[in-house]
Image: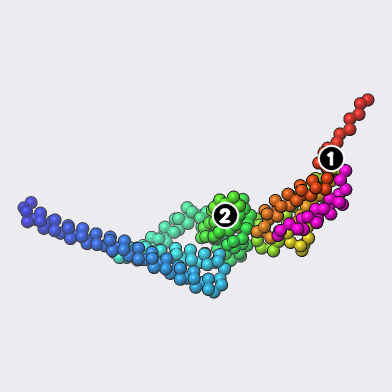
Amino acid sequence: MDAATIQTFIATNLNLLAGAAFKVIAAIILWFIGRKLIDFSITITSSALKKQRIDLTLISYLTSSLSVLLNIILVVALLGYFGVETTSFAALLAAAGIAIGAAWSGLLANFAAGVFLIVLRPFQVGDFICAGGITGTVVEIGLFVTTVDTPDNVRTFVGNNKLFSDNIQNFSTNPYRRVDLQAQLDHSVNHNEAVRVLQERICNIPNVVSNPAPVIEIIDFTPMGPVLAVRPFCNNTHYWQVYFDTNRIIRESFSESGFPIPQQHFQIRQS
């Protein structure tokens, strides 16, 4: 191979490499520009929906779906830029979708459950729920999973299908919630006096609602004496504050009233 042939070969391949490098760099630039435009479109769409006073849960779901769709369009456009036949790619994508659908049936079940959660709306963002073995505040309802912050501040991701197929308790729907506690009395204590003392003190606990009024009645009997059911009502936001304050008031009220500590008494007979 003479020098002229070598120079021609190098020049030809350099041109090909330069063209390929230019296309790659251009594709990277287009990708970043496309991503910025997608983010901008999502922001604009989200702002427009919020101005229409649409529910935040629905907004989150719609923007997530739009983001996935626009990213697919961007990928197809970049493949077309590289000369890939997009119609063939669409057919390949459809075939891959069928294969993935069969392999990831659980993922599709989560997607379908997410749609039903949005339509039926058993809960929304900000609600305090118990479902799928998780208790906490709903942060986001996504395409496949729902994000929940538990009371101990752990962010938990739960599959939508697990939530939708389980019993769902929504503590935020109703305006108030009952706190269930018990107070053990000694046999020697006048239960009417104990009820009166607790009724006065518990009604003054911050965030305890007056309607319905706290319920304090005998619920059980033990060898130590009668057991009082102590049940104030409060907003879900103040549940634990009322729970702890009520326990404290029970202890302080009985101590200040001079009620004896409940004790089990035994009678021993010697024949």
In this view, the residue in front, 260 or 126, is 260
Q: Are marks 2 and 1 in contact (CB under 8 Å)?
A: no
In the image: residue 138, left or right of residue 201: left
Per the rendered image, the range of residues in magenta is 188-207
Residue 189 rendering spot, x and y as whole percentages:
86, 45
Residue 117 visible from this viewpoint: no
Characterize the local packing of mark 1: few (<14), some (14-19) or many (20 or more) Cα atoms within 10 angstroms.
Answer: few
Give the amino acid type for the residue marked by disc 2 in the picture: Asp
Characterize the local packing of mark 2: few (<14), some (14-19) or many (20 or more) Cα atoms within 10 angstroms.
Answer: some
Report which residue position mark 1 lands on. Answer: 223
Residue 142 rendering spot, x and y as whole percentages:
52, 60
Report which residue position mark 2 lands on. Answer: 149
Residue at horizontal 57 percent and vertical 55 percent from the top = 148
Type of secondary structure dominating the magenta stretch: helix
* Cα distance between the residues tagged 2 and 1: 42 Å
When asked about the image quadrant of residue 211, the answer is bottom right
In the image: residue 122, left or right of residue 3: right
Residue at horizontal 20 percent and vertical 60 percent from the top = 18
What's the mark number on residue 88? none
Sequence-wise, which precedes: disc 2 or disc 1? 2
Residue 261 rendering spot, x and y as whole percentages:
81, 41
In this view, the residue in front, 175 or 258, is 258
Residue 6 visible from this viewpoint: yes
In this view, the residue in front, 262 or 169, is 262
Residue 202 is one of the magenta-drawn residues: yes
Give the amino acid type for the residue marked by disc 1 in the picture: Pro
Residue at horizontal 61 percent and vertical 50 percent from the top = 133
